[in-house]
Amino acid sequence: MSEQDFEVVVLGMSPGGEQVAGRLAEAGLAVAGVESNLVGGECPYYGCIPSKMMIRAANALAEAGRVKLLAGSATTSPDWGPVARRVREATHDWDDAPAAGRFTAKGGHLFRGVGKIVSPGVVRVGDDTLTASRGIVIATGTEPTVPPIPGLAGTPFWTNREAVKATAVPRSLIVLGGGSIGVEFAQVFARFGAKVTVVEALGRLLPFDEPEASALLADVFGSEGIGVRAGAAATGVSHDGAAFRVVLADGEALSAPSLLVATGRHADLATIGAGAAGIDETGRFIGVDERMRAAPGVWALGDIVGHGAFTHMSVYHAEIVIADILGEPHHAAEYHAVPRVAFTDPEIGSVGLTEAQARERGLDTAVGMTRIAESSRGWIHDGGNAGFIKLIADADAGILVGATSAGPAGGEVLSMLTLAVHARLPVQRLREMIYAFPTFHRAVQAALAGLP
Ligand SMILES: Cc1cc2nc3c(=O)[nH]c(=O)nc-3n(C[C@H](O)[C@H](O)[C@H](O)COP(=O)(O)OP(=O)(O)OC[C@H]3O[C@@H](n4cnc5c(N)ncnc54)[C@H](O)[C@@H]3O)c2cc1C
């Protein structure tokens, strides 16, 4: 049992938590970082990095498949070995010693274990009691949600954490959940030869994106032989030692040796002791102000504050927290231009409001849309050119409030749309811009033509 005094205790060394802890330690503050698993959080070990490596490999196979359209013939022999190897290299075989070393080299103190806030300014980790004279930063992120489907608990299903560790491609795979995590893994494993079926309880894949994005992905998945059961809730799961059986509400039964659960993420505020810090722990998320303050002497960042579960959000928040703790000037957090990308092929990038959200808010909503295949670059590109640009404008204000960029490099084309929404650039100025020919982003100009 020991009591140790710090200025700041960072609970959860997530991407943002690690950034706050490291920078404050470099600034000379006495900082404790508390981590129950791996320093760096979900993104480098179980999320963004390994999944995007898998996607890169799967896309190389898909591109090879397009050679026959464009350049003769190419044969491929998909091999998961290099993928599994690269993921293990990137994650140091799920060893955070390099990341932990970077933090301690900056002067930070790392405590391993599950931390809990026990009273204002006090965190307990195992036998250690850490006091924080300036404050506590909560960066504990989210966990995969396992839905209460009868029979599911106790079966050897995968979440993203097992999927990124796969050493072989399953013969067939059922994916529960058609959000971005589910659809990314579905396409990867299908492109490596698995027979994949995605089950989404809501009416469409990517249910919170534009319906055109859902339709596009459903088409692409259909053409790649990926089954989609949208509007189909799973009502029962069983595992007989070799295969899963998933029964859907309409009575259909799916069977496969592997099952991936990708039905969302959640945080349990009570387990981190949010209540003891003066935070309402009954909600799904921690409420924060524009400086990420959750209660006196408590900041929260990342997935747990409910403004989008993205690494770029976590590290955006981190900069605000760092400045606030150091008493340096910084802009307030704002969320009108949050970008997000589903790294499927085609990539689906979006920012700001969807058309439905703009209409719900009562905005004078106008829509401009164009198909990538109809652009010069899309026509040149040919195979794999499915996609569209959809712009959502507040016609009254003459600015874009949202956009979706789906297609080859859709996530990259998104950058100019994020800038436009973020800076509230007048639509008229966007029309006056020169767009390089023949780029994918030039399709934005065609979509603008559809706006009043
Ligand atoms: C498969 C997948 C793919 C993704 N792809 C992308 C992508 O392409 N782009 C993108 O921007 N985002 C992506 N994300 C989301 C991204 O990983 C998260 O938004 C990001 O990690 C930021 O999360 P966070 O800062 O809230 O905390 P997390 O990364 O969730 O980290 C929280 C940390 O806190 C620790 N912790 C929790 N409770 C305690 C406790 N009581 N005591 C001590 N430690 C604790 C955890 O062990 C963990 O290390 C992906 C996620 C998944 C699952």
Image (spheres, rainbow, N blue to C red):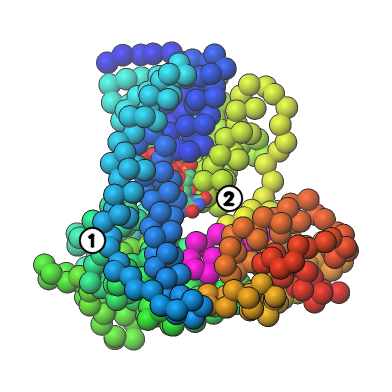
Q: Residue drawn 43% across and 18% down? A: 105
Mark 2 or 1 closer to N-term? Answer: 1
Q: Quadrant of residue 276?
A: top left
Specify whether residue 343 is painted magenta: yes
> Is disc 2 in contact with disc 1, using a CB cutoff of under 8 Å?
no
Q: Residue drawn 48% across and 66% down? A: 344
In-front residue for pair 90/324: 90
Rendering quadrant holding ligand 1: top left
Q: Quadrant of residue 95?
A: top left
Q: Residue drawn 43% across and 24% down? A: 103
Image: 126 above or below 265 = above
In-front residue for pair 120/85: 85
Residue furthest to the left in view is: 241
**Magenta part of the chain:** 341-355
Which residue does the numbered mark 1 point to in the structure image?
Answer: 168
> Which quadrant does the C terminus fall into?
bottom right
Residue 263: tell me if it is visible.
no
Q: Label 1 crowding class (10 Å Cα cut-off): few <14, some 14-19, many 20+?
A: some
Q: Residue drawn 17% across and 71% down? A: 243
Mark 2 secondary-structure assignment: loop
Residue furthest to the front in view is: 72
Image: 92 above or below 412 = above
Q: Amino acid at mark 2?
A: His
Q: Quadrant of residue 239?
A: bottom left
Which residue does the numbered mark 2 point to in the structure image?
Answer: 307
Image: 323 above or below 172 = above
Mark 1 secondary-structure assignment: loop
In-front residue for pair 41/60: 60
x then y, percent, for residue 15: 48, 38
x then y, percent, for residue 38: 34, 36
x then y, percent, for residue 29: 53, 15
